[in-house]
Amino acid sequence: MNVQTPSIKRPATYQDVLDAPPNMVAELIRGALHLQPRPRPRHSRAITRLGVKLGGPFDADEGGPGGWTILIEPELHLGEEVLVPDLAGWQRERLPSLPDDVGITVGPDWVCEVLSPSTRTYDLTEKRDVYREQGVAWLWFVDPAARTLEAFALKDGAWVLIAALHDDAEVRVAPFDAVGFALGALWAD
């Protein structure tokens, strides 16, 4: 007689993140392991260019007000959740120095997700919900295929659209509204 033991489904752990294939981005949300492929070149270009546009005036204090720490693909440890946003920013009074450990436990003030076919639904639903629950004040979605940027602010526990830009519009959007740049600078040629 062949008796099958039902498989026991366990919540994913940080060890599952560490054991993920190196060519994948691993995240934990609500006890589930999520694996996404590394970004495609257009996606990476948009992340890099946005990091440069914001990094100078806001992180490096070059030609702008400064006061921020902006990181590309930081690993966030927010309670039980482990997330890797495309970009995240902290006002320096909330994160005065970078931790030595991999996971940053201070929730960011600003997050930007660059949408791609493999991450679009996940970014716009599950991750967006976690950012709201964690009190992230501003959330941007950049879509290189549609050439758009949508920006949201957290008001009374809900996301409120504060800007919807496309093509080569000037980006001067909270929390980085002190210095503008052309949205078209994010699109790969």
Image: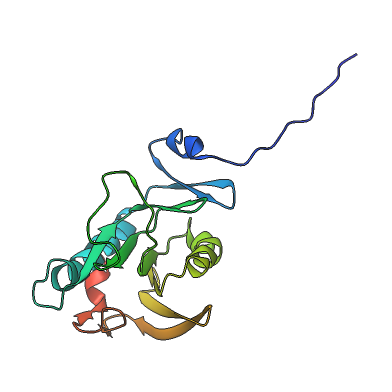
In which quarter of the view is residue 166 placed?
Answer: bottom left
Asked whether residue 6 is in view, the answer is yes
Asked whether, in this view, residue 169 is left or right of residue 32, the answer is left
Asked whether residue 189 is in view, the answer is no
Q: Residue at x 30, y 54 (%)?
A: 41
How many tags in the picture? Answer: 0
Q: Residue at x 35, y 59 (%)?
A: 86
Asked whether, in this view, residue 135 is left or right of residue 4, the answer is left
Whether 41 is drawn above or below 159: the answer is above
- Residue found farthest to the left: 62
- Residue found farthest to the top: 1
Please name the colour scheme applied to the rendered image. Answer: rainbow
Q: Residue at x 30, y 66 (%)?
A: 94
In which quarter of the view is residue 115 placed?
Answer: bottom left
Residue 5 image point, x, y percent: 80, 25
In which quarter of the view is residue 169 placed?
Answer: bottom left
Residue 28 image point, x, y percent: 51, 48
**Which quarter of the rendered picture does the N terminus lie within?**
top right
Of 135 and 126, which appears nearest the observer?
135
- Residue found farthest to the right: 1
Whether 103 is drawn above or below 18: the answer is below
Of 114 and 187, which appears nearest the observer?
114
Q: Residue at x 43, y 79 (%)?
A: 152
Whether 17 is drawn above or below 38: the answer is above
Residue 179 image point, x, y percent: 18, 82
**Which quarter of the rendered picture does the C terminus lie within?**
bottom left
Residue 161 image point, x, y percent: 45, 84
Whether 128 is drawn above or below 183: the answer is above
Of 39 and 172, which appears nearest the observer?
172
